[in-house]
Amino acid sequence: MTEVDSPLDAASQQVRRAAAEKQLRPSIAGFFDEATNTVSYVVHDPKSCEAAIIDSVLDYEAASGRTSHGSADRIIEYVNTNNLKVTWLIETHAHADHISAAPYLQEKLGGKLAIGAEIIRVQDVFGKLFNAGTDFERDGSQFDHLFKDGETFALGSIEGIALHVPGHTPADMAFIIGDAAFVGDTIFMPDFGTARADFPGGDARELFHSIRRLLSLPDETRLFLCHDYKAPGRDEYAWETTVGQQRRENIHVKDGVSEEDFVKMRTERDKTLAMPNLIMPSVQVNIRGGRLPEPEDNGVSYIKIPVNAV
Ligand SMILES: [Fe+2]
């Protein structure tokens, strides 16, 4: 018996409609940040010019504690040059390797800041780790909108649907816009594999199910990844692939790889990975919707490092 998965069915139908009709397909620009290997996207409806910005990056120099806006300003320039109207600022999850520039972009361009509804679980875990105190709300209220599995939205006449894809973190979402899926940290390029599943609340088994769910979308679905690290034998960064290509070629999860084999591989590999350089500042700021902690009485914001706690 096959499981009923109506959000997935709805997403598949949406992809098929968009694949058949050009007007239902979005224009997509990827912006690669080499310092954190992150890809940010501006996705828009060419007809109405309504746009979403997905997974933006605030530049952060860890040694000096200085932030800057080079990456975000490139996005602003693109939005302005193309006369786009930003309606959504979307985070696929609370990133552990870069700080989000969403509040800065929202101030300059408008739009609603959104993330997956399960962010409250991530806020709870990290609120405790950073001893954030009672003034840190753990109800997602730092965001304008919390997406649930199967929830639909639109960019002008282009359809969108959110899918909950936990595993890397409990709150990860994929956003399917027209025929394009923005899959966050689930799957990477076929020659690199998949995202790690060892952060607090992460789960390799859940990640496998989430990835297989995404790979149940039609073969022609365009997949846009959140990161790229190149791969042995590949000198160029890449971030676009398709469901069909992943099912044939992904070194971790192509068709035929069993759940048990995946979980074993992922768990063993995660044990060898160091924590991302910017995990402490990133998580601390991103669970606050990308806002720095409240300034202290001298007007300066501080980032905490929990010592010997992780
Ligand atoms: Fe991530």
Image (cartoon, rainbow, N blue to C red):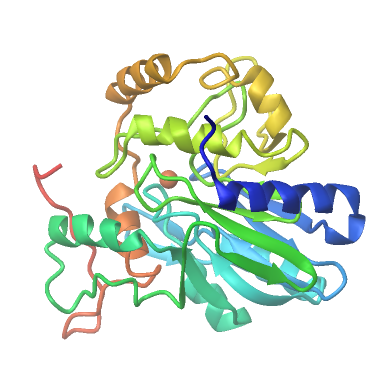
Q: Is residue 234 visible?
A: no
The tally of labels here is 0
Q: Give the quarter of the figure containing the C terminus.
A: top left
Kindly indicate the quadrant of the structure image that contains residue 293: bottom left
Position of residue 231 measured from the top left corner of the image (x, y, whole percent): 58, 22
Position of residue 84 measured from the top left corner of the image (x, y, whole percent): 76, 75
Instruction: Say left or right for 108 vs 50.
Output: left
- Residue under the image location 59 percent in, 79 percent down: 111
- Residue 118, compared with residue 272, is above or below; it is below
Kindly indicate the quadrant of the structure image that contains residue 136: bottom left
- Residue 272, compared with residue 83, is above or below; it is above
- Residue under the image location 42 percent in, 74 percent down: 143
* Of residues 124 and 82, the one drawn nearer to the viewer in this rendering: 124
Instruction: Say left or right for 45 vs 54.
Output: right
- Residue 70, compared with residue 218, is above or below; it is below
Identify the residue at the far front of this view: 1
> Which corner quadrant of the figure contains ligand 1?
top left
- Residue under the image location 28 percent in, 56 percent down: 122
Instruction: Say left or right for 161 vs 187.
Output: right
Instruction: Say left or right for 27 vs 208.
Output: right
* Of residues 102 and 277, the one drawn nearer to the viewer in this rendering: 102
- Residue under the image location 47 percent in, 45 percent down: 165
- Residue 146, compared with residue 130, is above or below; it is below
Position of residue 302 measured from the top left corner of the image (x, y, whole percent): 22, 68
Kindly indicate the quadrant of the structure image that contains residue 14: bottom right
Position of residue 223 measured from the top left corner of the image (x, y, whole percent): 67, 41
